[in-house]
Image (cartoon, rainbow, N blue to C red):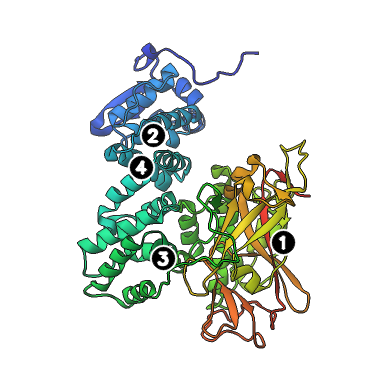
Amino acid sequence: MTPKVQVPMDFGIEYLGSPSHGNLKFLLKDGEELLTNSAIMSFNSPVIKKMTVEDGQTTIDARDFSKDTVQCFLDASYSGALKKISKLNFREVNKTVHVFEVSWLIDRCFEYFQWLTETVEEEKFYDQLYVFDEAMFILDILKKRSYIDIVIKKFAFLANCAQYFATYYFGNISSCSTKSLYVILEMTAKQEHILMEVLVNNIENDKSSLNENSRYILHRLNLPACRATNEPLYQRLLDQSENIENPSPEDFRLIMKILRQPIVKVHKEVHEPTSNAAVRNLPNLFHDFKQLQDVKDLDSLATFLMESPLVRNCYVFYDAVYSWLFDKAIDSQTPIDSKTGNFIEIFSNHISRSGWKPLAREYIKHKKNEYFGLGDLNKKILRNPKLVTDSEYYRIRSTTEYNPDELFARNHDIKFKFRQDSITNCNKQGDCGFILRVTAASGEQDDSFNIQLVINPNLYPDDIHFHRESLLLADNVHFALDITDDENTTVNTRPVTWYSKPYRDGTNKYWCWGAEFFYMKGNGRQPPGSRYKTVWYRGSNSTVRIRPVVYCFGIHSE
């Protein structure tokens, strides 16, 4: 039997353009044509194979691409090597190989981009701008996040690159796209002084009012922490904010937020703040629901989630849909049964393209019949084998449960016991596991509350110890809450991903985390002014109990 042709292969570049071999024409701009062989091109591209073998086409319309791009693509297909790619044609060549689904050339383009990114130096802004813009184009057009991930990683590796790039890129923050803003916010997440410096510079340059991007950054900043770590810069922000000439009502609200910020002080009875080397943020938590509120329909929501750099796994994607539907159900009396078919297909295809692990079946089953606004969404998810799994995850509950004040209002450590698959011979005293460190919420609607993975083994107590193999947990855990009310009824895995940070109401009767209201006093009636008419009210007189739970991959829970 003749072996199947494997590409890449050197078919002989000398045959490209030969009239005797060229039975397939690539039509270019201005009426030009390039002759190729349909068999050689079909071996490389399943798309061209379908067009020629199944549909009988003898021409391919390539007028959307430059001649240089098409020539580079054809040369590579014939020679088995990508030799003519450059910074000038990379975008078009990469787009072309994706259009024709040439898998080995897709890999070569990615390798070339990795090389370009690795050559970036700390103070060469235009080189940084090139790889950033190309990665954002790929995220926007091709829906691939892998390119921007390596840019973020490279910028983080260079000591001051993120600050240097953000400062120049945000020279005029009003012209920055929303998606670029989100990515740079992600890039600078652990260095809030960079964002505060950018914000101050932009207000100094335009004192008329705050633009939309400035408002978003100001809303995201942890102002108490910023003030505690850099009082002079905070004072500059305060001075510039007071000088805004025509503040809108939203501007005024944010300015008042700045004026009310206290200096953060650490209570002597709780743990001292730890350095960045000791803890790691959870990137899949504390997203702002305001990003979803203006989305009008499921199609628009799907587009937003596929393009957002915040959405890194299927749990974050699903929680956004769940929270959006919950919010929309408040204003609607019609479930979405008839609208979810296409959405499920989009969700499923996006998971496959992104290489995400599927959702835990039990995570969906817990929410199957919670409220009518979900319609048949969860039922369709459970019937789709690409979207759910019974084995590729572990659900780990914290060793302790808490009342609302214990969980939100104090600095403390949440302990989880587990043993990772790769750890087979641990002989340390106590249990393998990890700690999520909680920084107390102030009670105000601010960013003081935080949950971080403790990654320094020296900070662990005697009864639990941390293995270096678990350093990547921060990027691969999904945080939720199991909640038990005063009638001892437990509702499992309540999502909080898109609900920002918890805070108290003005009467101190309850803690609020998004649509979740945890009452501390009174009879558990709906909070004044709440839009959530169907919200879950759990407990009164502090009897509600909360147990944090995480969903993880690649570990064994004892």
How far is mark 4 from mark 1, CA to CA? 45 Å
Residue 442, above or below 434: below
Q: Quadrant of residue 504?
A: bottom right
Q: Residue at x 57, y 50 (%)?
A: 313
In the picture of the structure, the residue carrying the numbered disc 3 is 223
Residue 55 image offset from top left, x and y in percent: 48, 33
| Dot placed on the residue nearer the N-terminal end, 3 or 4 | 4
In the picture of the structure, the residue carrying the numbered disc 2 is 117
Per the image, label 3 sits on a secondary structure element best described as helix
| Dot placed on the residue nearer the N-terminal end, 2 or 4 | 2
Q: Residue at x 25, y 31 (%)?
A: 31
Rate crowding at label 4 as few (under 14), some (14 to 19) or many (20 or more) other CA atoms within 10 Å: many
Please name which of the two marks, 2 or 1, marks the residue nearer to the observer: 2
Q: Marks 3 and 1: in contact by CB < 8 Å?
A: no
Residue 256 image offset from top left, x and y in percent: 36, 76
Q: Residue at x 34, y 28 (%)?
A: 70
Q: Residue at x 71, y 64 (%)?
A: 366
**Along the line of sight, which residue is nearer the eye, 233 or 90?**
233
Rate crowding at label 2 as few (under 14), some (14 to 19) or many (20 or more) other CA atoms within 10 Å: many
On residue 365, the disc is 1
